[in-house]
Image: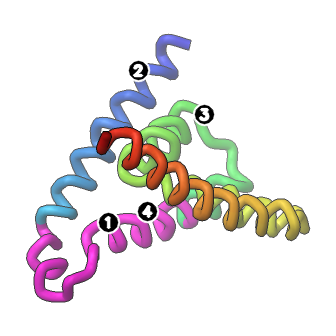
Amino acid sequence: MIKSVLIVGLGSFMGGVFRYVLSVGLSRWGKILSFPISIFMVNILGCFLIGILYGYFKNKEVDSYLILLLMTGVLGGFTTFSTFSLEVLQLFQQNELLKATFYVVGSVGLGILACFLGYIIGNR
């Protein structure tokens, strides 16, 4: 368990650093476009990368620590949106259309609502 936690922690550190570097590098474009392009691109890139890893690892014998490092750690630290997207994909692949739809609508809708309520509480 300790080894797994350390591997995920190392990956999360690397993913967080990658996210920061990419965000800083793209921040100029966000100002030009008046759009949060940095995190938008991080989310899309993270989804693309987790799709590649999932597709590559799915039918192979892969060390579970490598999966923990790359998918849970690096990409989890880079963006949790990638994990969310993978879980939605997996629900669709399992023909769980109702669950997938609820997960998407519920996560986004309730996430925004929770953020708004948290803002109201924190802004008192």
Badge nearest the viewer, 3 or 4:
4
Q: Tell me the SS state at disc 1.
A: helix
Can you identify the residue that label 2 sits on?
Answer: 6
Location of mark 3 (residue)? 64
Q: Amino acid at mark 1?
A: Ile
Mark closer to the chain start, 3 or 1: 1
Identity, as a three-letter code, of the amino acid under mark 3: Ser
What number is the disc on residue 39? 1
Q: Which is more N-terminal, label 4 or label 3?
A: 4
Q: Residue at x 9, y 76 (%)?
A: 28
Q: Is residue 98 above or below residue 33?
A: above
7 on left or right of 95:
left
Looking at the image, is mark 3 or mark 1 nearer the viewer? 1
Region rendered in magenta: 25-51
* Type of amino acid at the residue the image marks with label 2: Leu
> Which is more toward the observer, 84 or 117?
117
Looking at the image, which is closer to me, 11 or 110? 110
Which of disc 3 and disc 2 is earlier in sequence?
2
Residue matched to label 4: 46
Residue 22 placement: quadrant? bottom left
Task: Give the CA distance from mark 4 to mark 1.
Answer: 10 Å
State the quadrant of the C terminus.
top left
Say few, some or many: other residues with alpha carbon within 10 Å of mark 3 (under 14 / 14 to 19 / 20 or more).
few
The reply to whether discs 3 and 4 touch (Cβ–Cβ < 8 Å) is: no
